[in-house]
Image (cartoon, rainbow, N blue to C red):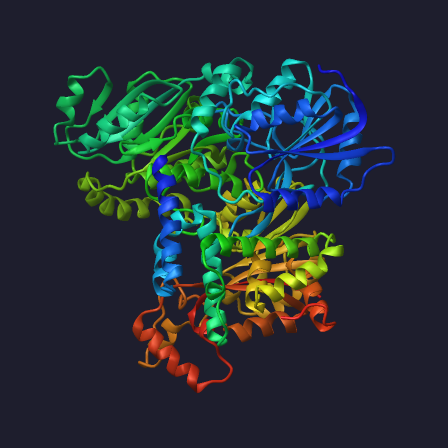
Amino acid sequence: MSKVVRDKEVCFIICSNDRLYTEECIYYIAHLHVPDGYQINVLTIEDAKSMAAGYNEGMHASDAKYKVYLHQDVFIVNKDFIQDFLDVFRQDETIGMIGMVGAPRLPASGVMWEGPRKGALYKWTAQQTEEIWMSDDAQTEVEVIDGFLMITQYDIPWREDLFDQWDFYDCAQSKEFARRGCKVVVPKLGKPWCIHDSGFVSLMNYDKERLKFIKEYGQEIPALQDKDARKATVILTTCNRKVQLQDTLEWLSGVEGISNIVIVDNGSADGTADWLASRSYEYLWFDEGIQGYGRLWNAALENFATEDYIVFMEAGVYPEKASLSELMSALQDENAGIANLVTNFYDDGGNRITGRDALTVFARDGRTRHSSNAPCRTLSSNWRIWAARKELFERVGLFREELQSPDNVLTDYALRMIQNNFGQIVCRGGACAWESFSQGEEIYAAAWQWQAEDRTFMKAAWGMNYFNLRPNRTLVKYIKEPSEREFKVLEVGCDLGATLFEIQSCYPNCQAYGLDVNEAAVDIARHIAKVKYGNIDELTIPFAEKFDYIIFGDVLEHLRHPEEVVRMCRELLHENGYIIASIPNVMHISVMEELIEGRFRYSDTGLLDRTHIHLFTYYEIMTLFQEAGYEVKDINGTVFDLSGRQREIMNILLKLSKNTEAWMYETFQYTVKAQKR
Amino acid sequence: MSEQVRWDLVLKERFDQLLSGRQYDEIRTLLQTDKQIIDEINDLAIARVMLSVCDQEKEAGQQTVYDKVNSLEELVRRYTILMFYLRRFEFDIMDDSMAAFRQFLSMNHVSLQELFAVMYCGNIDKEKVLRIIKDKMLSGEIVI
């Protein structure tokens, strides 16, 4: 370690190429409280060759014991920042470096954001500023920290010899401290200590730098060492998609963690069988026409030797190269039965993601959008690629061959798993892109028939017509709590518990309760939360607890006494507790369009679902909550594009009334957050 | 990967061309063509935020923020400085910058719509900043 010269001095070292940002960064530094007897100074390194080179220049130019290396777009808002980090260093001399965000265990890919992280920050993109919480329960020793702000008490040279760009200098420095026996920690922050105006980050040289990092430090990354010990059997299904099969197999040759590939050809007539016969793959060809997936997957399991981990996937799916390893890591959790990947089909806003490059961005953003990067529990599976431990099949059994459509086969299996106390998770450390079924139309045709037959079987097996497996994320986003906080949520009409699952994933210390009138759904949901049978319309619930949030996702309109129920909830809520609700808008222009033609047709689902007993407009919703003793803190709406005719009608209606505005006709569904007064 | 950099430069250059010709309809088309690409180019994402400001200013019969700048760089700089000032309010470190802030608002003809849009995008505690701005407007410390 370098000689310590001034042990009561703190030097802030900034690599700068933007005067405006650097001055703002320094402005915040100038407003920090400086502990008695301490001095601070700031060094800016203009137009450094690389981050590591710039930081070495700063390090050599300063004699300060404590050095804060920060990006020019980082603004320290914790005024006691200096005292706070000094306290951390003083408690343990072996702590060499402190970060604001770090990874306790770096994923095998070497990409920090692909795994769980600790810490917090305020982050700005051009769209908005938000508080990002990874986790902040206690000071944590981490494997690597994020480079936007790094504080050291010992001088260790930065690896400019290896990292000549702007990535991985931070992970490398963390490893250099570890090599010298020093700990790297993320302290308990309380509130974020800084803002990071990173905007959109270019990953242009990222992978090149990643490979350098893996080469240099691979032996010192535990996850990488573990990963090498785990291998999976891939069961790859296809039907008349020879070209995509060939493309997928070529792609899989670069994917880590595969032991063997078993190809299941579902009756292809496009020469797939001939092509496979001339290759060395293990394969199974169904020559008696297209088979349902229950039979297909069972045949693969029964006819081929498999590894401890099995990945089921379709031709035309392209997993990120470290994804299968991440799936296997996620399945280390003994409660995890099935692991899924983040997919490119839809993002959270329902937008279709296309292209493998977009996949990378989507996967990364998908990970950072969540307060925790730990594998997320879920009810819905992506049948196009999923993985399970082999022992699962020994404990739960094989697939039901009566079921044919792959989504139904997997849904049924997932529900059976839940009954055996196994969960499903989405592994945020990996992502996959998949191409649509532009070929293999025979499967499409078969799937239509399968769905009808499967529905009958599923209804008989589970006593339900419809399987609500997707969480209502719009409602979950209204819960604003530090990720570690303990609080209680009750969801009325929780069905199978998908939304409660999502809440528990985002807030591990949240106690989730559910209530539903469907006994079959309760029977499943009680395995994932404290769910009981009950009808809130009877103005009683089977829980004695008080809650911080009560959720009604498309429920109030089904009740006979919504006003009384909402009023009763005041007694069930803690002081300042919230109701979060989604409620369809009967004033939506599609309804008005029908009405002026003299029609008001009920349907099985949607705005005019025939089970809706009460109908609401914006004003009725506001009245409902205000008269029941709540203050509406937030109300938003889901809107869809209107047709020309609808817009025309809306403009006429707007002229007829002074009390309505365009959004009242455009909003399909309202979401409300109302606080108990 | 280099393709992304070319797109970045091409689109920014195109924006500047359209701005210098005051071709606002074309700018709108450019910024709304591909949300995903625009979101990844920070400066253009800012320009899109400012486009909605323009719409509001136009509706109010005011000069628009696009009329007040000559390039994307100027637009982004203006946005960034405004955001920095508002943040200082949020984190209680505005102190002696108040005069500079007033001067910035006045010299750059910042509208209320622009101020609120930047506040919405740039601040965590929007309620706090809004309260401070309202108080300062009522007391005459800030004039827009």
For the N terminus of chain B, give its image quadrant. top left
Q: Is residue A26 above or below residue A272?
A: below
Q: Residue furthest right?
A: A36
Residues A243 and A560: in front is A243
Q: Residue at x 57, y 21 (%)?
A: A172
Q: Residue furthest bottom?
A: A656
Q: Is residue A569 visible?
A: no
Q: Position of residue A156 (x, y in %)?
A: 66, 18
Q: Residue at x 72, y 68 (%)?
A: B141
Is A170 left or right of A242, judged from the image as shown?
right
Q: Position of residue A510 (x, y in %)?
A: 64, 44
Q: Is residue A576 visible?
A: yes
Q: Residue at x 68, y 25 (%)?
A: A61
Numbered marks: total: 0
Question: Which image quadrant for residue A668?
Answer: bottom left
Q: Position of residue A182 (x, y in %)?
A: 69, 18
Is A660 left or right of A409, judged from the image as shown?
right
Q: Residue at x 72, y 60 (%)?
A: B98
Q: Position of residue A404 (x, y in %)?
A: 28, 38
Residues A521 and A352: in front is A352
For the C terminus of chain B, give its image quadrant. bottom right
Is A392 left or right of A122, judged from the image as shown?
left
Question: Which image quadrant for residue A290?
Answer: top left
Is B23 left or right of B65, judged from the image as shown?
left
Q: Is residue A414 above or below residue A514?
A: above
